[in-house]
Image (cartoon, rainbow, N blue to C red):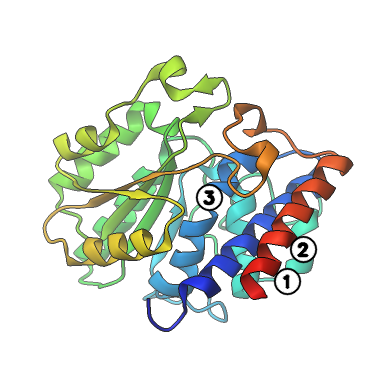
Amino acid sequence: MDAMTKKELSVIATKIRMAIIDGTFGAKSGHPGGSLSIADVLAYLYWKELNIDPADPKKADRDRMVLSKGHTAPALYGALALRGYFSTDLIPTLRHVDSFLQGHPDMKHTPGVDMSSGSLGQGISAAAGMALGAKLNGETWRVYTILGDGEIQEGQVWEAAMFAAAKKLDNLVAIVDNNNLQIDGTIEEVNSPYPIPEKFAAFGWHVIEIDAHDLDQIEAAFAEARAVEGKPTAIIQKSVKGKGVSFMENQCSWHGSAPNAEQYEQAMAELKATLNGLEG
């Protein structure tokens, strides 16, 4: 792993997790569990993979990133703030009436947000449209979208998957965050989308399976995706919901619950210990 080291990216991922806890605690609401599970891939995307410029958020040739599972906006906001799109001081204003950090991403008011999202299933459709637009205009920028495994129970996801393969959108990468939990329980209990890799393959996608918290595997997956021609790529990342905070890990109750003051202190203490271990 060149340029930015794996250790440096791990530091950033931990800081994103701290921002998630700061934001949801400040809001007294939000979705920490599924936000924590995508911190590593966001660190890699925003610091190594994406062609972006925080000083020019709307530059025409930038890569696009659509958070299809828009309820995990606390993770996206953490990444954008740390990357320099806006001040990290704004993180605790999450979901406040006078803040542009609303509960779901808003492309009209939040710097760095490429697509408003939150109604599940729609983000990947928008991403496919962006990718097709780039192709039609002869542009070389790429489009990335992050979906939840519960989200792919939506039929619109599979319409978009069929469309993207039919149009040979090899400039599109969908990352499915497979933490196996949604608000009502495990995804098998609610409405099983398994087997996920085989489904995307059947729809004509190139499929890569990784550990969501292994930065070497993340790097290899994006490198592989860039080499694919003639079809979109689905990266199925097996993750831990609530990753990095012991009492939140693998607990569906943290899908949409904010920490109280005592839980906030414990979560931040754990994350600070992780950060100190990485930086020490």
* Alpha carbon distance from label 2 to label 3: 19 Å
Count of all numbered marks drawn on residues in the image: 3
Local secondary structure at mark 1 = loop
Can you say which quadrant of the picture contains the C terminus? bottom right
Q: Which residue is mark 3?
A: 116
Question: Upstream in the sequence, badge 2 or badge 3?
Answer: 2
Tell me which residue sits at (45%, 15%) in the image.
Answer: 189
> In this rendering, would 217 be left or right of 3?
left
Q: Nearer the viewer, mark 1 or mark 3?
A: 1
**Residue 90 tag number:** 2
> In terms of depth relative to the viewer, which is nearer, 20 or 145?
20
Instruction: Count neighbours of disc 2 (C-alpha within 10 A) and say few if under 14, some if 14 to 19, many if 20 or more.
Output: some
* Residue occupying the far right of the picture: 261
In this rendering, position of residue 8 left or right of residue 146 = right
* Amino acid type, residue under disc 1 in the picture: Ser
Point out residue 7 in the picture as x, y percentages from the top left corner.
52, 72
Pick whichever, 162 or 276, lies toward us.
276
| Label 2: which secondary element | helix
11 vs 227, nearest the viewer: 11
Find residue 174 and report its horizontal and vertical position in percent.
33, 50
Instruction: Specify the label residue 87 is tagged with.
Output: 1
Q: Residue furthest left?
A: 230
